[in-house]
C-alpha cells in the first residue's frame, strides 16, 4: 500500500506539474498574442493617422499654395507666380496643425520650415525647390549633386521685354530660357553652362537668373510679378520614379509609451 501510495502521489504531482506548465505556456502564448495584437493595432492606427494627415496637407497645398506640380516624360515642373504670397496657404496650414494636434496628442507638426521657405524635395534626386522667405521674390533650386540633365524656364511678363542679356560660362548643364512679353516680344535661348562656377547670369528685364557652384539655380525678381514655370529634367530616371515631398521634419507621430515613432515626408505627388 505504501508503494502504491507513493506512486500515486508521484503521479499526481507529475500531473499537476504538467498541467501547471501547460497553463504557463498558454498564459505566455495569450500574453504574446495580446502584445502582437496591440502592436498590429498600433501599426494600423499609425498608418491610418499618417495617411489621413498627409492627404490633408496635400489637399491644402493643391487648393491654397498657388503652386502647380506636374510630371511629364522624365521631368518635373513647378508653376507659380513670382512673388507668390502664399498667405492663404500658410494660414490654412497653421489652422490644420492646431486642429490635428488638438485631436491627437501623439501627433506633432512642425510648420516652421513651410512658413520660412516652403521647401519641396524631388526624389530620388534629392533636389530641393524652395523659396527664400515664402512671399519674397526669390526661388532657388538646390541639388545635392548634379544628377540631372537640364533646367528649362518659361517666364511670362505683364510688360514688354526690354532687356535680355546672357553672360554664362560654357559647360555640361543645359539651361533653356523662354520668355514672352505683352507685345509678344520674346527672349529665348538655350545654352550649356558650367555648373561649378558662380558667374552664370541671365538678365531679362528685372529678372536675374543665376546658376552657381554645385548647379544651384537662383531666380530673383526685382520688379512686378511674373508667371514662372521651372522644369528639371533627367533622362537617367524614369517618370514613375519621381516624387515630390515636404521635408521629413514636418510630421511626427509618436506612441511613446509603446516606443513606436514615425517621421513622415508628406508626399505631394
Image (tube, rainbow, N blue to C red):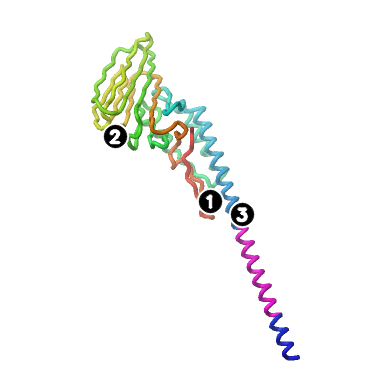
Q: Which residue is mark 3?
A: 37
- The residue lying at 52 percent from left, 27 percent from top is 63
Quadrant location of the N terminus in the rendered image: bottom right
Whether pointer 1 and pointer 3 mark residues with C-beta atoms closer than 8 Å, the reply is no
**Mark 2 crowd level (few <14, some 14–19, many ≥20, 10 Å Cα):** some
Identify the disc placed on residue 214: 2
Q: Say if the magenta span includes residue 20.
A: yes
Q: Residue at x 67, y 74 (%)?
A: 18
Magenta stretch: dominant SS?
helix
Q: Is residue 216 above or below residue 156?
A: below
Q: Residue at x 44, y 27 (%)?
A: 73
Residue shown at 39%/36% (left/top)? 125
Q: CA distance from mark 1 to mark 3?
A: 16 Å
SS class of the residue under badge 2?
loop
- Circle 1 sits on which residue? 255
Name the spot of residue 104 as percent of width and height, x first: 56, 45
- Whichever of callouts 3 and 2 sits on the residue coming sooner in the sequence is 3
- Specify start and end residues of the magenta stretch as a single range: 12-34
Residue 176: give x, y in percent of width and height.
Answer: 33, 22
Amino acid at each position: 500500500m505504501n508503494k502504491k501510495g507513493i506512486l500515486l502521489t508521484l503521479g499526481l504531482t507529475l500531473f499537476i506539474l504538467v498541467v501547471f506548465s501547460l497553463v504557463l505556456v498558454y498564459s505566455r502564448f495569450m500574453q504574446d498574442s495580446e502584445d502582437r495584437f496591440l502592436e498590429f493595432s498600433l501599426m494600423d492606427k499609425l498608418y491610418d493617422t499618417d495617411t489621413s494627415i498627409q492627404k490633408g496637407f496635400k489637399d491644402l497645398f493643391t487648393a491654397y499654395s498657388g503652386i502647380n506640380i506636374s510630371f511629364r516624360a522624365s521631368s518635373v515642373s513647378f508653376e507659380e507666380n513670382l512673388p507668390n504670397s502664399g498667405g492663404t496657404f500658410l494660414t490654412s496650414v497653421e489652422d490644420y496643425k492646431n486642429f490635428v494636434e488638438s485631436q491627437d496628442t501623439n501627433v506633432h507638426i512642425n510648420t516652421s520650415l513651410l512658413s520660412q521657405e516652403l521647401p519641396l524635395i524631388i526624389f530620388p534626386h534629392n533636389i530641393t525647390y524652395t523659396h527664400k522667405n515664402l512671399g519674397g521674390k526669390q526661388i532657388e533650386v538646390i541639388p545635392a549633386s548634379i544628377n540631372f540633365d537640364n533646367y528649362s524656364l518659361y517666364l511670362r511678363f505683364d510688360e514688354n521685354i526690354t532687356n535680355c542679356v546672357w553672360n554664362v560660362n560654357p559647360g555640361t548643364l543645359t539651361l533653356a530660357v523662354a520668355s514672352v512679353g505683352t507685345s509678344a516680344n520674346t527672349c529665348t535661348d538655350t545654352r550649356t553652362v558650367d555648373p561649378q562656377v558662380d558667374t552664370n547670369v541671365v538678365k531679362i528685364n528685372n529678372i536675374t537668373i543665376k546658376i552657381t557652384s554645385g548647379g544651384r539655380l537662383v531666380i530673383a525678381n526685382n520688379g512686378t510679378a511674373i508667371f514662372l514655370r521651372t522644369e528639371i529634367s533627367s533622362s537617367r530616371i524614369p517618370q514613375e520614379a519621381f516624387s515630390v515631398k515636404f521635408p521629413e521634419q514636418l510630421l511626427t507621430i509618436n506612441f511613446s509609451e509603446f516606443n513606436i515613432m514615425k517621421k513622415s515626408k508628406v508626399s505631394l505627388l
